[in-house]
Image: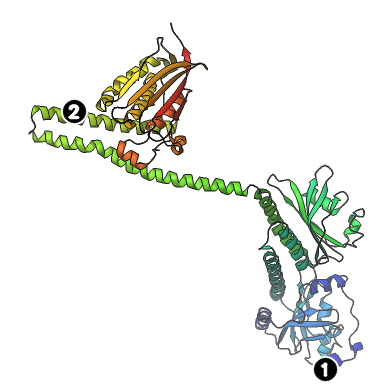
Amino acid sequence: MLDALPPDRFPSIPLPTNEAERLEALRRYHVLDTPTEIAFDRITTLAARLFDMPIVLVSLVDHSRAWFKSSYGFDLCEVPRGDAICNFALLYNDILVVPDTRKDDRFACNPFAISEPGVRFYAGAPLMTHDGYNLGTLCLLDGNPREALSDAQKATLIDLAAMVVDELELRLAAKKIAQADAALLTVTQGVSAVTGNAFFQALVLHFAKVLNVEYAFIGLVVDHEDKAIQTIAVCAQGEISENFDYLLKDTPCQAVIEKRTICCYPHRVQAQFPDAPLLAPLNIESYIAIPFFDSTGSAIGLLSMMDGKPLENVQLAESLLTIFALRITTELERQQTEETRTQMLAHEQQARTQAEAANRMKDEFLAVLSHELRTPLNPILGWAKLLRSRTLDPARTEQALETIERNAILQTQLIDDLLDISRIVQGKLSLTIAAVDLNVTIQSAIDTLQLAAQAKTIAVKFEPPSLPIWVSGDANRLQQVVWNLLSNAIKFTPAEGKIVVDLKQVADNHAQVQVSDTGKGIVPDFLPFVFESFRQADSATTRHFGGLGLGLAIVRQLVESHGGTVEADSLGEGQGATFTLKLPLLRIVD
């Protein structure tokens, strides 16, 4: 057996100058004494085919042995390090090729050469890590001497050795990913069902557990001038501990807040911060922390880990800190907004109610619009057909023409209202400003609607002031305002009712116009909405009285565009209504 050969059969070989670091690099891959893996076996099989070799090994050189992660054509899984030719290859950063071991003084007495497997030819390419450590070799062995490898063959062997290292890196990366996933799952599950202070406490507990550290805490900056920290959750030795305050000065936490990024001191942190008050009493060796920020970008606190030994997995710690620093910020913001949550919910409910009402209004308006546009069209079309038949006598013909004209005027007014409200919404309503005598404006509107009032036996009373009352505005638009108010009053006032129009100058240098009626009145709940577009107290009102519900909305917009105000008042249903508008007074002329 190879391991039974006398140790002095093979001369002493010097160790690599970085042997301790090399062994540490080998151990970080956690590959020694693991089962065979097809990824490595494929490489040794491929090398055997490419080079026509009976033996190919992935040899990893530990402190006392050469262990084979994959072996092609060889039964042993390891040999003593002193017997391994690969041990010599560790001294080189290039391929070691021995065409005939019996002709090389270095290997003439090597157990591999003088007994089974009787190696005569050896070629080993270093398994060099990305940071320059030689873990072992991918080596070719043959029981017969061979010519030295060509440059192309050397390049191929080097590539295959690099593939071995790549597989080791992939294996390590997969292990780290699995470890990170498990840690992330543990922490996430641990904090998923809690909020507020319970969340912060659960977070530091699970952080300390998955990162295997003694201390974890979350602290907030409470005094930016003196840079003091107040902890809100502390885990010490696996248990929640009391919160405490401390100054940032001379601590690693100060570096975290000032640099605004992760700061990691995986070992000897006391040497870098000798005046930090907590490190020496707690015998702290390692420290890592990350700051978190508010919505303005200011560092408002930190999540910290400390331990009495060197930090084991810096990359995992940094990843978890980065993820949960954001979660801490989110939870702090949630806490800050908790006080206004009820109010926000109430506002949300109000907005939802308003949106639903707006949708209902839209549907009702579309139905009303369809009805109102069809209403004047039906008599127009009906009488037009009768006129085309030429069967009407002169009296009926005159009636037909009057009906067509009246309904055409009605439809024109409906369309004008729609166009006006569209212009108002788009800000495209134009005004021709001049001096306007409100006496004349009101009287003109009354004259226009006198027939409509007489048809319902409604008395319209207006006693103009003895002197003109002048305002600055668009005469046509102001007449439209009064016309809309009077038209609205006539519409909702029953037969034998009364409408009173009053004009006067009031104390605040305004002209005041009031239109009062004895009509249907306005229920208190609807008063705040009476000037909104498409709003009527109920859809039955629209069906009974007609109209699109735009008249008062147009009134308000026109009055406000003249710098005035308009208000509605009513004692309730059946109590009539009073509309009061005020316009800035221009002057009073004798």
Query: At label 2, which amino acid type do we have?
Result: Glu
Q: Nearer the viewer, residue 353 or 206?
A: 353
Q: Which mark is residue 508?
A: none
Q: Dot 2 corresponds to which residue?
A: 402
Q: Position of residue 330 (x, y in %)?
A: 67, 53
442 relative position to 143: left or right:
left
Does residue 146 appear in this view? no
- The alpha-carbon separation of the residues under discs 1 and 2 comes to 128 Å
For marks 1 and 2 on the same chain, the one whose residue lies earlier in the sequence: 1
Display colour scheme: rainbow
Taking depth in this image into account, of 526 and 392 the one nearest to the observer is 526
Residue drawn 41% across the image and 11% down it: 468
Q: Quadrant of residue 489?
A: top left
Marking on residue 1: 1
Which quadrant does the C terminus fall into? Answer: top left
Which kind of residue does numbered mark 1 sit on?
Answer: Met
**234 left or right, relative to 515:** right
Look at the numbered disc 2 and give the secondary structure of its residue.
helix
Q: Locate residue 531, reporting x and y percent.
A: 43, 33
| Residue in the image at 19% along x and 31% along y | 403
Looking at the picture, tell me which residue is in the foreground, 492 or 32.
492
Disc 1 packing (10 Å; few <14; some 14–19; many ≥20): few
Please rate how many residues cluster around mark 2, counting C-alpha atoms within 10 Å: few if below 14, some from 14 to 19, many from 20.
few
Secondary-structure class at tag 1: loop
The vertical placement of 26 against 207, above or below, is: below
Q: Position of residue 45 (x, y in %)?
A: 66, 83
**What is the quadrant of residue 216 in the picture?**
bottom right
Split into 4 quadrants, where in the image is the N terminus? Answer: bottom right
Horizontal relation, residue 413 to residue 121: left or right: left
Query: Could you say where residue 404 lies in the image, as x and y percent from the top left?
Result: 20, 31
